Image (cartoon, rainbow, N blue to C red):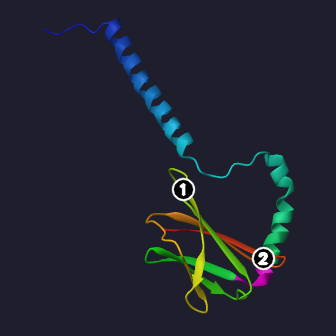
Amino acid sequence: MQKEFTGRKMAAILVAGFGVVVAVNFTMAAIASGSFSGVVVENSYVASQKFNGWLDQAERQEALGWNAEASRLGDRLALDLENVPASATIYAQVRRPLGQADTRELTFVQTGEARILSSEALPAGRWIVRVSIERGDDRWVSEEQIG
């Protein structure tokens, strides 16, 4: 004998289905907002007014001819330097691209003429490396991902 499909059963199916959708949406929204580590601009209009200055700064940086390429060497961060003067000061900051915010400042020791190595170990995983090189009024900045 076949059971009758009533309005009550249909209402229960609709409520359960939409309940699952709402629960999944709230869960995903909570995870997304809790793990966001991107850059947020306080005022996009003010940031847009600085754009031409950023372009000028990028041209000055390009004219320096400096370069630093980040890579892993064992459990350390290695920077291969190109045309960087010996008198320049080099800073590096690493942060995780996803998940919990984990930011570290690194110090370096010279290992060769064109390579420096971090004094601290860098845990395994993906990192965003921001390198700053300064000498007097000259400044060079680069950001890249390593994994």
Query: Looking at the picture, how far across and down is residue 16, in whole percent?
Result: 37, 20
Query: Looking at the picture, how far across and down is residue 73, in whole percent?
Result: 47, 79
Q: CA distance from mark 1 to mark 2?
A: 28 Å
Describe the element under mark 1 as helix, strand or loop: loop
Query: Looking at the picture, how far across and down is residue 9, in whole percent?
Result: 32, 11
User: What segment carries the magenta color?
Assistant: 62-66
Instruction: Look at 48% across and 71% down and name the residue there.
Output: 121
Query: Looking at the picture, how far across and down is residue 11, in whole percent?
Result: 38, 11
Instruction: Look at 57% across and 47% down and name the residue there.
Output: 36
Magenta stretch containing residue 2, yes or no? Answer: no
Q: Identify which residue, 107 or 32, lies in the foreground.
A: 107
Instruction: Look at 53% across and 46% down and name the residue there.
Output: 35
86 left or right of 121? right
The residue that mark 2 highlights is 61
Quadrant where the N terminus lies?
Answer: top left
Residue that sits furthest to the bottom in the current view? 113
Of the two numbered discs 1 and 2 in the rendering, the one whose residue sits closer to the viewer: 1
The residue that mark 1 highlights is 102
Q: Quadrant of residue 103?
A: bottom right
Q: Amino acid at mark 2?
A: Gln
Describe the element under mark 2 as helix, strand or loop: helix
Q: Amino acid at mark 1?
A: Asp
